[in-house]
Image (cartoon, rainbow, N blue to C red):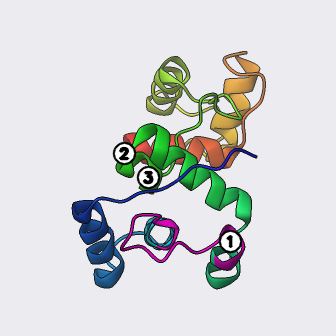
Amino acid sequence: MEKYIVELTGQERKQLSELVSKGKAAARKITRARVLLQCDASPDGPTWTDKQISEAFGIHTNTIHSIRQRFVEQGLQAALEHKKQDCPSRRRIVDGEVEAHLIALRCSDPPEGTNRWTLRLLAGKLVELEIVPNISHETVRLALKKTH
């Protein structure tokens, strides 16, 4: 595995130290800041090994390697932030078109024999009309909640 050398500038070290000491950021971001501070190979830095960092913070050495790599290749902010997926693992069921059908259906009269649309009725109708191949009532609930 290729070793990426982290050399923090004084400004970066100060920024990371403040982030860690304030503790007002996401836990994952603070942990990444701590990892970068301990990996610092500049003359002022502690230069811990990946194994020492792994044991101290309870994270895998592969995670430490990826933090180092992102810092060297993309900079400080990229190393601290959560990486967006290049390709989402699942396609969204409710896109703009399905959402429009759902809202139109919700605003229409409910089926005969019922007073109002339920989430299960809406989900069943979307499948019946072949707008989506399948959908759960919970997905319908979330979509309607989002549109209010």
Mark 2 — residue? 148
Image coordinates for residue 124, horizontal then vertical, percent: 73, 33
Q: Seen in the image, is 98 located left or right of residue 24?
A: right
Q: Main secondary structure of the magenta part?
A: loop
* Among numbered discs 1 and 3, the one appearing first in the sequence: 1
Question: Tag 3: Cα neighbours inside 10 Å, few (<14), some, or many (≥20)?
Answer: some
Quarter holding the C terminus is top left
The residue lying toward the viewer, choosing from 147 and 114, is 147
Q: CA distance from mark 2 to mark 1?
A: 40 Å
Type of residue at label 3? Glu
* Among numbered discs 2 and 1, the one appearing first in the sequence: 1
Type of residue at label 2? His
Q: Is residue 45 magenta?
A: yes
Residue at screen point 65% across, 50% down: 3
Q: Seen in the image, is 135 located left or right of residue 66?
A: right
Residue at screen point 70% across, 22% down: 132
Residue 115 visible in image: no
Image coordinates for residue 49, horizontal then vertical, percent: 65, 71
Type of residue at label 1? Ile
Q: Of the numbered discs in the image, which one, if any, rests on residue 59?
A: 1
Image coordinates for residue 25, horizontal then vertical, percent: 36, 71
The residue lying toward the viewer, choosing from 107 and 53, is 53
- Magenta residues? 38-52
Q: Is residue 104 magenta?
A: no
Q: Which is more foreground, mark 1 or mark 3? A: 1
Q: Is residue 126 above or below residue 147?
A: above
The residue lying toward the viewer, choosing from 86 and 15, is 15
Q: Which is more foreground, mark 2 or mark 3? A: 3
